[in-house]
Image: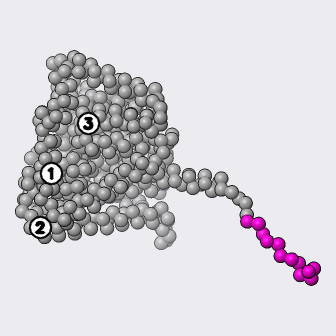
Amino acid sequence: MRRFEDIYVAVWCFVMQMTGTLLIPFIQGTIPAYMLALGSTAIVFLKIRSWNVPPIVVRYLISFSIFLALWLLLLGGSQLGLLLSDRRDFGLVYMVDPIDNTIVLRSTLFTQSLYLLCCVLIALYFRYFFQEKWMRYIFWSAYFLALYGLYEWLFFLVTHESGDFLVNRTFFGGHTASWSQTMSFGGIDLLRIKSTMLEPSVFAAAVIPYFFLALEHRKMVLASLLFFTAVFSTSTSCYIALVACLLIRSFWTGELRWVYLAVLVLVGIFLGSMALFYPDVFRDLFHDKLAGLNASGAGRLGDILNGLDLLSTYTVPNWIFGIGVGYAYLRVPDAILINCGLLGLGAFLWVFCRPVFLLPITPGYGGIRTALFGILVLFAISLTEFYIPSTWMFLGLAYYKLDEYRRNQRIQARSVAPTQRPPVKEEPTPGLT
């Protein structure tokens, strides 16, 4: 059983970031990490022997039950809210399935909930059953992410064609999940690295946490590869998250380590050279995008404004429960507020922010804390993909580390607790008084 579980997790970690590949090409959502997440439930139940349920399995089941209860509450509340408000449309907000005009019980309510279920199973498994020896599997996955991205970049540099041979996933309208984007530097077209992810901005959500985990474990070759792919993703959000993580890590520790200083200097040199020699590219990446002057920036600004227009029509039940899981497709915090209301947004912030505030910055914990902070920065900036398997793996790892830290704190507290016993009152010996 242990050997099988080791192999299972090794394969699971290796395919964790393969979001453009389907095991069954004509069925959306059958990406390898999701299918292995569903299969992990069998491994959990195999840990139960002769109706003797281990305490760790009990905790896993309790956490899953809490998620299920919250989902049912949001399901009932959101759909009832739609009926009571007699809603006819959702304005100009971009929906997950824009050609579906259904209001109550849209099909995406169930398909997106299945994605969420798989992601929660990933997080729970890595929280409760992770073993330190499996960390090498996560690094294998990081090597694959970096090397495949580097291969794609070099292939395009030579042939000017996409070399992605893993993708077989398409979305509505036939759009491929391998969204190859280019950027011209002095007349040379370079591929924006996305590796096995959907696009460069989504790639940032994987490469940033892997990068800081590699730095934490002093895997400098891997960190260098990941840094190169992050830089040549030419993703504005990736640059912002990278710098934000380096600065917050230095603030937490109270010192600027040489490796972080070196990364900041390299990022500064790259961006400075871009601004000096390729001002049009720099302006498009930063000024025009942040000001909403180019297509990408204007699209994101339009999404925000359309979301605010929809929120202005919300009734009280809509504000509490939203309009339904998986309805709107927007930046993650906006989508959660619109789809799941204040209740869902509160649950999201509680789950994702707790490890960032409670984990220490000491060796063994600082890397995963910084990684999760980077994911939150990307959520806040522009990321629209909430169901990235590696995101939920890092969430599970953060809680695993938080549980470990609290356990060590309790052990340490018991070891230094005073061992003095209260004085025993002496009773007079009978017959001597």
Q: Quadrant of residue 195?
A: top left
Give the image location of residue 130, x and y in percent.
Answer: 45, 52
Residue beneath label 2, please? 85
Reading the chain from its start, which is encountered first: label 3 or label 1?
3
Asked whether 166 or 191 is in front, the reply is: 191
In this rendering, the answer to whether 179 lies above or below 7 is above
**46 or 84: nearer the eye?**
84
Q: Earlier in the sequence, mark 3 or mark 2?
A: 2
Asked which secondary structure carries label 1, the reply is helix
Mark 1 crowdedness (10 Å alpha carbons): few <14, some 14-19, many ≥20:
some
Res. 237 mark: 3
330 is higher (above) or lower (below) than 432: above
**Which marked residue is nearer to the observer: mark 3 or mark 1?**
1
The type of residue carrying mark 2 is Ser
Q: Which residue is mark 1?
A: 308
Is residue 52 visible to the viewer in this orientation of the structure? yes
Q: Which mark is residue 268?
A: none
Report the quarter where the C terminus lies: bottom right
- Asked whether residue 122 is in view, the answer is no
Bounds of the magenta segment = 422-433
Left or right relative to 429: residue 118? left
Q: Amino acid at mark 3?
A: Ser
